[in-house]
Image (cartoon, coloured by chain):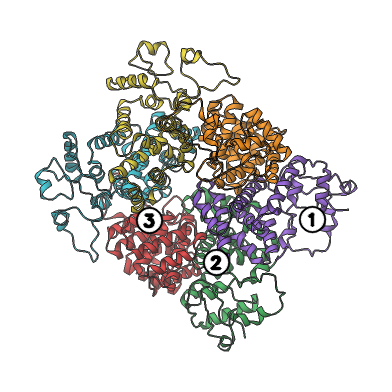
Chain colours: A green, B red, C cyan, D yellow, E purple, F orange
């Protein structure tokens, strides 16, 4: 039976299809302290690390009952990742919003495209660095480290994508995404032409733009709500 | 039989379920010149106004076959609005992307919320003004003019929302949305508190953030592709 | 007998050469409610549009007696435009200031120049968009719509001049004017050379600079005083 | 017989009412080398200081014949200041423009106002510092040094007005002028209220705004044309 | 015998007190490929991680002979850290510069102060994040993770210090340091007062300012030379 | 016997190796009023110029006993300059800090380099203008006036280095220094290449970067502490 929520105590475990999202400001959700995952296997540091991702957001939103589709999806996340990404838990107060987010995310980040999955993750991180979004930098920085097989690349993109020694294609792609993030009103045909010269098709340009656009949305939802990334991300693929 | 695409000539009309989206750079789609809607009913100005919204985007993307759901949705748009919003035609090269966009848009802008529909349109315009997005300012500026019954309000939000004589609630709402747009990394608990003091619930704060986030995405997709608003918007509700 | 001031009641009508400018903060000038122009001919909207331009400015300044020259000039405005532009009423508390403003404005915007009148209006709008000036965008946006015979061009320049499909000359002209507005300290010989390559003479460069400079002044006087454009502008030349 | 133009050779001296403004790019006007004022009385430095203000502007504009009013005005300048401010020579290619500039300048900077003349000069310098305008910083920096009797104040305002130890009135005045310069669209009633609390009347607020606006114009005309201040300014009132 | 330089081949090893700093653009220093530290103990990733820190800087500078003091200092670094920080190798082309840098660094970061060592490291990271400096974020991010016993704190400060849940003292300290970094000309007595109210003495304020200032220098030397952090930093204290 | 401190009264003079740095906020140090240097030789202006540089900093820091090296150094300053630069007095509360500052400063500004001393001063002023640092603009503006033999050059660099008519080498040098100051994260190989094309060696590029970096530090220490330049600088080399 998958753990649907990191801060679920017994009650929640007993009602797996009705996870309790408690985004209580300034405190951990009930049961978190006795969570076995937290109580064991970690030497106590001098200053115990804060439970950085509880609450997940700084808004008090009651979780909704997961739809069957989302129940299945959360289980899949749990099985593959070992945890449910907090952004999904954050959206889980409303199934229409959660499902719309998941549909768009999965199409954009996992659907067919001439822009590879790791390239899309690179865009996610470069955009999120421009917007200084903690959630997305932690989650997608980990993804770049993992998918690229080059942990340093993840650090470069988090800190300043210009220090990464990118090929022409990747540099053009990130220059476009970052300019689109910082001053979208200045994008013109010349910018699209630079992408074409770097080998991107018009369909690729749409995909680059849509991914960059999507993270400009997600960065803002995350920043507006103080969304916290799962602590699991920080150590992944170092 | 609804016209699915403004620049459809006879061929397209004959194949209503397979509209041709021709976003040919620098030129009008085939058949546009003979479109009856354009050929009649308008006195020739000294300088004929450019066919501002053809092509709809500056990318050459082949339209896909509309899914049944989208066929129905486009018909509904045509019936109610008299035209299909160009953003839908722009996404119509890929049904997965179009349907994800429509699902998220309709939930955000038309779903239940403590933030009224006209308030959501106000956010759309204030965000789009910050990002200087032509498509969204034209389309949602018209919506504000229409829904508010106050044409000047639409102009205020397009030009500088600070000149609108807003009540405390609306000012707080737009201040938050514009700050979230301009410098999302600076949003903190104090900003959420200002919304709560203006009467918004935590759920409202999510909705304000999500709408502001959504237009930060749409503004960028529109700017990245030089998306052009339907000319119909410009005269609406003046 | 021309109406010299939109918010003139009986007294003023009786003394046509001594209009009363009442810029009372937070309220309408006396008599405005009973102004026939406002009381008739307009279907009541659900939310009646605010009398957006009363008071004209957020400063309490007593109007001065119009000089003969200004009396004649205001009459000419009334005859030709159907109203007195509010900026003139705003300056009318002091004849020296009003006359200096009118002299400079008329020379710059209507005098001989290699830069055409509509081009000068285009500069006015592009500069005012950069400065997000409500008064000037409303008034000069209407002028661009009118003089160009292309209503969309007015919208483009209000929202983001980069979306207008300008010829090389006009693009160079507006790029210069907007750069001069945003970061005047970075203008150098290369910028002037770009204008010359686009066909402008040195005298034209002066005129472009002077018009851009003038609206950087007017934008600031308008923003500093919350100057409101005549409501008449909003519907003109749509 | 006043020297109307610093770079006047014999011909010009013989036709005093028809000064020759030669704004030849990259070189001094004919006759300048033999100008007695330049040829004598100055020890040759190791690197002779560039003739910084010839040409006065980087545009090739033929001077017009001075009108009688401007002939008289230039003579007055020469008598009182010992030189003609270069900005006047720059505008002297067109009498309508010169006279409009002089009328507005003199009203704003020398007319009656609750804002004293030195205060208006302080605004001029603080605005010009924000815009990094060489001409206006040199000319009006000298004026502040002179009129205030405090040479350091001129330096403070040129470099960073926040280091000047200003009283509450002057600080509020310059904060307003600099904000109006940097982001005019953000000025609101609260900003005007701060001026009122510092003792300014509504008429004073107009004057502060008008002076700040005027220098936002002049800074841009000067930067657009590479206008050079008379070298005389640099040593004045140190 | 300590390895003084990561890219030392045989020659260097034979002359330990005369390390060869080869900052060859675009390539690794001679001998680097056969460096045992790199050749062993690491499973080959799919995409082998770039030798990110060779060359250390993008300038071709010949290393100087280490002075006795610096020989001893480098040995101490090697013994304690296991490597020589690349910034020291970068400065090692000139002993006067290296020694001046080391003296200032050690005094600022390790000398007595009311601002603790981990607080000084926090300032280093927050400043470097504002300046997006790869070298300093990697090196001092690791230091914050290590010294604070809270790895997440290091990530917070790298990404956006506002997401760290700081106490009042630390927040005031970083707000000051970041404002001093972004717009030093706006720091005034009120800013110092906020630090005093958070419990800092005037001497502490000097130290906070000096550390923030120092990293504004180091960030720029690092960015100007494309200085690369030792790869060792990235995995430290995760 | 040198005066070690401008605001030293009798006591201090009697203990020359133990100068008293009194940085009392809002007032002059004891004895300052009777300082002969201030009491004589200057006609009383209407508004006596404020004792602009007392206190030297807005922090209350007790001066330390000068080390023998610093005693000698201060004497040398007094002998050569006629005064002790206030920055040295400001650092004199701690000998380790003062000596580290002096060592780095003297190496950078006076040591051997392919970048001449006046070029280094030019960098100092251009960087300080970008950061609007009063102390450094006053002190190093005077140095540029003095060393270049061209007083106007100092004014240009204080106000806007782009108005100086620089040769290609100097323009490239200052463009790099100012870009490194304003947005260090955007410096890339292309920027270094521009310096190389202007004739600078890689070692010169280090020196330009180090000087620009150093003033980015000093500007911030000065702004953070409201450090005031010696009044002597203002009149030097006009």
Q: Is residue F235 left or right of residue C212?
A: right
Residue under label 3, please give it.
B32
Indicate the secondary structure of the residue bearing disc 1. loop
Residue under label 1, please give it.
E83
Q: Tag on residue A108?
A: 2
Disc 1 from disc 2: Cα separation: 43 Å
Give the image location of residue F11, x and y in percent.
Answer: 62, 38
Crowding at dot 1, Cα within 10 Å, few <14 / some 14-19 / many 20+, comes out as: some
Q: Which image quarter: residue E17?
A: top right
Instruction: Report whether mark 3 lies on the same chain as mark 2.
Output: no
Q: Residue furthest bottom?
A: A14
Instruction: Report whether mark 3 lies on the same chain as mark 1.
Output: no
Q: Quadrant of the N terminus of chain C?
A: top left
Tell me whether the residue at label 3 lies in contact with that at label 1, contact meaning CB atoms closer than 8 angstroms. no
Give the image location of residue E75, x and y in percent.
Answer: 83, 52
Q: Is residue A114 visible?
A: no
Q: Is residue D46 placed above or below C230 in the rendered structure?
A: above
Q: Is residue A80 placed above or below C69 in the rendered structure?
A: below
Frontmost residue, A173 versus A228: A228
Pointer 3 indicates a residue of which chain? B
Frontmost residue, F156 versus B42: F156
């Amino acid at each position: 039976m998958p753990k649907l929520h990191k801060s679920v105590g017994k009650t929640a475990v007993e009602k797996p299809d009705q996870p309790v999202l408690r985004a209580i400001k300034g405190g951990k959700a009930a049961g978190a302290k006795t969570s076995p995952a937290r109580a064991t296997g970690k030497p106590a540091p001098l200053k115990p690390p804060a439970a950085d991702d509880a609450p997940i957001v700084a808004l008090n939103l009651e979780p909704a009952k997961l739809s069957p589709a989302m129940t299945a999806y959360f289980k899949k996340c749990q099985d593959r990742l070992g945890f449910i990404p907090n952004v999904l838990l954050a959206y889980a107060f409303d199934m229409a919003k959660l499902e719309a987010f998941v549909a768009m995310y999965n199409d954009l980040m996992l659907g067919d495209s001439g822009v590879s999955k790791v390239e899309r993750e690179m865009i996610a991180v470069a955009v999120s660095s421009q917007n200084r979004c903690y959630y997305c930098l932690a989650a997608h920085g980990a993804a770049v480290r993992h998918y690229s097989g080059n942990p340093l690349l993840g650090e470069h993109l988090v800190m300043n994508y210009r220090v990464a020694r990118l090929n022409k294609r990747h540099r053009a792609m990130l220059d476009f995404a970052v300019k689109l993030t910082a001053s979208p009103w200045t994008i013109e045909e010349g910018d699209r032409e630079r992408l074409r010269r770097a080998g991107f098709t018009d369909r690729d340009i749409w995909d680059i733009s849509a991914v960059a656009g999507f993270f400009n949305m997600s960065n803002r939802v995350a920043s507006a709500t103080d969304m916290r990334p799962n602590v699991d991300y920080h150590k992944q693929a170092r």
